[in-house]
Image (cartoon, grey):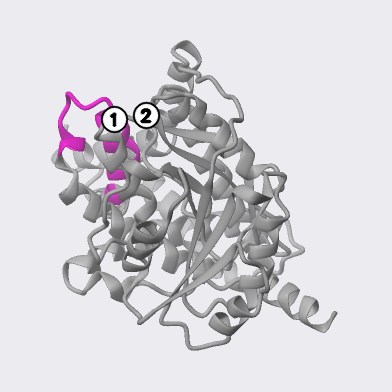
């Protein structure tokens, strides 16, 4: 067997394992070894922290969605930590007119610093961390808190539901998120969660430690800190927050940041790569595997040149067709059947490319990776609300 063929087969096998083999094996194992928890709603004081920079169009609807919760009103306190906002965020919070809502205005320093200051000020037994854009289901807070009836649970994350998009591009972004949630549900069943969802998660306040100021993924770093103390990270998919779909361009920027954040996690939690760690196989297969996917695909493309015939022709034709669909997708009309295939190919390639671009964290300050996530659907909905 030639070296070219060996490289090609190894790379293709790796890609297949990360994208399909591991998730399927995980799903099978999760059915055999589930580890459920006891749930009971015991109302506890909540401190809800919303770190935000320039979120004027979202902040009041966000606060209302939290205050409209089914949870006991006298146990809810909301702390909006404004990270150097220069729009109307601060006055909108100050004018909200509810004693349960407080503003903590800080100079711009980044999300990690905002979260740290929020944790210092928080007084609730349970701290809920959430982003500014997503609305909460009325039952979400209660469902999060019910999971803390299990003494060994230190972090509870809810489910982020992406509303249906109007374009094939937005649909595929949402489809990718559904695939991610399927994997998370199976990781949860065997107590092997690899973080939380930043839009909706809760922690026991006494377990929280400060984040390094340049942290990109508070929703992975904080849960891993708490897990290292022997507590469980639990995924409660009945606790829901809702968001609008994003464009592929916006999702690419978000994915670059999250993948760069995984590099940070690797260096800050090196025991994750120790085979004795119960999360080792899952972190290596899911998180580390995703980082290595673009390199495997590049190596497979190079290895194709050295394949013997007729395998060379088959492999080369297949890759040309795939990447050809990626290139022509922006010009394919939404109404055509071909769009179903080209849009998927483009979405997959763009998200894989984001993992390749994440290496910029080794050459640029982490804070440079922070950019606002834009949603055309949400922006138009926000404008409609303002008119009303």
Residue that carries the numbered disc 1 in the rendered image: 279
Q: Nearer the viewer, residue 258 or 202?
A: 202
Q: Which residues are magenta?
A: 271-292
Left or right of 184, for residue 364 = left
Q: Is residue 283 magenta?
A: yes
Task: Please give the name of the residue rendered at 75% of the width and 73% of the height, measured from the top-left corner.
Answer: 381
Location of residue 7 (image quadrant): top left
Give the quarter of the image for residue 211: bottom left
Label 2 crowding class (10 Å Cα cut-off): few <14, some 14-19, many 20+?
many
Q: Is residue 201 visible?
A: yes
Residue that mark 2 sits on: 192
Mark 1: which secondary structure? loop
Examine the structure image and report whether residue 314 is included in the region drawn in magenta. no
Q: Choose top left, top right, bottom left or bottom right for residue 314.
A: top left
Residue 48: percent from left, percent from top:
52, 55
> Do labels 2 and 1 touch, CB within 8 Å?
yes
Residue at 22% from the left image edge and 55% from the top image edge: 264
């Amino acid at each position: 067997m030639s070296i070219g063929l060996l490289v090609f087969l190894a790379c293709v096998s790796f890609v297949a394992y990360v994208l399909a083999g591991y998730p399927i094996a995980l799903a099978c194992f999760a059915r055999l070894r589930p580890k459920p928890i006891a749930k009971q709603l015991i109302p506890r004081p909540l401190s809800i922290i919303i770190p935000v920079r320039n979120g004027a169009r979202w902040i009041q609807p966000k606060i209302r969605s939290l205050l409209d919760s089914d949870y006991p009103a006298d146990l809810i306190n909301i702390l909006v930590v404004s990270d150097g906002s220069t729009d109307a965020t601060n006055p909108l919070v100050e004018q909200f007119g509810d004693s349960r809502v407080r503003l903590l205005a800080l100079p711009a320093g980044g999300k990690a610093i905002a979260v740290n200051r929020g944790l210092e000020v928080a007084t609730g037994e349970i701290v809920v961390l959430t982003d500014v854009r997503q609305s909460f289901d009325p039952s979400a807070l209660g469902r999060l808190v019910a999971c803390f009836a299990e003494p060994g649970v230190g972090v509870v994350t809810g489910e982020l539901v992406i509303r249906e998009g109007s374009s094939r591009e937005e649909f595929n972004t949402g489809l990718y998120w559904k695939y991610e949630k399927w994997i998370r549900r199976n990781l949860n069943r065997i107590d092997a969660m690899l973080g939380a969802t930043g839009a909706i998660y809760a922690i026991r306040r006494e377990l929280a430690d400060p984040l390094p100021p340049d942290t990109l993924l508070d929703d992975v770093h904080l849960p891993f800190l708490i897990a290292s103390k022997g507590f469980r990270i639990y995924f409660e998919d009945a606790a829901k927050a809702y968001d609008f779909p994003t464009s592929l361009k916006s999702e690419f920027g978000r994915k670059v940041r999250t993948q760069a954040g995984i590099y940070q996690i690797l260096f800050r939690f090196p025991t994750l790569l120790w085979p004795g760690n119960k999360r080792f196989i899952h972190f290596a297969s899911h998180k580390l595997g995703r980082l290595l996917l673009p390199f495997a695909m590049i190596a497979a493309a190079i290895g194709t040149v050295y394949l013997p015939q007729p395998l060379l022709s088959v492999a080369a034709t297949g890759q040309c067709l795939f990447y050809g669909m990626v290139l022509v997708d922006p010009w394919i009309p939404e109404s055509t059947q071909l769009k179903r295939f080209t849009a998927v190919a483009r979405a997959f390639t763009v998200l894989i490319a984001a993992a390749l671009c994440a290496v910029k964290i080794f050459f640029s300050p982490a804070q440079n990776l922070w950019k606002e996530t834009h949603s055309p659907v949400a922006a138009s909905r926000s404008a409609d609300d303002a008119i009303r």
